Image (spheres, rainbow, N blue to C red):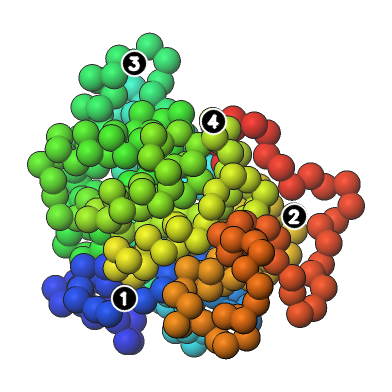
Amino acid sequence: MSTPAGHTTASTRQHPQLSPHPLQPPRFGYGTNGLADLRLDDALALLSDLGYEGVGLTLDHMHLDPLAPDLAARTARLARRLAALGLSVTVETGARYVLDPRRKHGPSLLDADPDDRARRVDLLLRAVRVAADLGAHAVHCFSGVTPAGTDTDTAWKRLSEALTPVLVAAADAGVPLAVEPEPGHLLATLADFHHLREALGNPDALGLTLDIGHCQCLEPLPPADCVRAAAPWLRHVQIEDMRRGVHEHLPLGDGEIDFPPVLEALTATGYQGLTVVELPRHSHAGPHFAQQSLSFLRQAATATASPADQAPAERDQPDTVSPHTAAIRPVPHTAPLPVPPPGESTAASEGRTP
């Protein structure tokens, strides 16, 4: 397995979130599943030009196809491109139809057919190899929905068995596997993540992808408290807006989340991976939402700074509106943003997974 220039080997790599370091603000990225109408090279150039520090790379047919020939060579070219643009990367495996053109997110790690489960395991093993060659922070995955007629104990047993070889490969590669609690899936909550972690014996290679919107959707704790509770296992973060009880990924500012405390918690816990905007149903206006999201997050991050850290002009503004309240509204830009194409909705169907 090749190692791109500038990246450490598996034996020497230390994950940024586990290493001693001064507290740093979140490092923002944008998910390629929200830029599906762009060629990958164009998407990366856009994110670099906008000022993003990284990218959440979904392995899919329109970008880096994990099943097409010459994956290692294509990955090496991508590693060079990422290095030239100064972009960090996390590898994500949530493509809807990359394995089955008729079944969304199928097959899963929970399917009754062992050959189907093996196909999903193979995808994750490919993702680990890609992540190692890219010097990625983590490989993201999720459990899948429990199949009809499958009891819960059987589903958890299948999940544990399927992830075991992936965790071995992740440990060998020095890249953590970051499992995401997903509404409607077997592993849906932080409590479910801990159930899996304990069932597997708390392996070092097993980490957590925390989706901030999912916290708002169904966790008992507020999103900022979820960040603090998840900190020891946090390897990847996805971010978007959301409303309580509705699994619909919304542009930042369109839902109910108070973002400054979330970003403050990420900084305070020392998380140093990427915080990736996750808007998979907004590719029809991807460049617009990429620009809007970064401006929003920068303003929200500024709202977390102490008065001593702010510029004098900022400190002299009348305190008529809470900065936390102000930061959850759409923010002004120095240049007009492109308007989403007429007639195209930006909202997902309520309750549907991305």
Disc 1 is placed on an element classified as: loop
Answer with mark 4 or mark 2, whichever residue precedes in sequence: 4
Residue placed under numbered mark 2 in the picture:
284
Q: Amino acid at mark 1?
A: Leu
Residue placed under numbered mark 4 in the picture:
245
Disc 2 is placed on an element classified as: helix
Marks 1/2 in contact by CB < 8 Å: the verdict is no
Residue placed under numbered mark 1 in the picture:
23
- The quadrant of the rendering that contains the N terminus is bottom left
Q: Amino acid at mark 3?
A: Thr
Mark 3 is surrounded, within 10 Å at the Cα level, by few (under 14), some (14 to 19) or many (20 or more) other residues, namely few
The residue closer to the viewer here, 13 or 275, is 275
Residue placed under numbered mark 3 in the picture:
150
Disc 3 is placed on an element classified as: loop
Left or right for 64, reference 36: left
Look at the picture and state if 68 lies above or below 344. below
Q: Amino acid at mark 2?
A: His
Q: CA distance from mark 2 to mark 3?
A: 37 Å
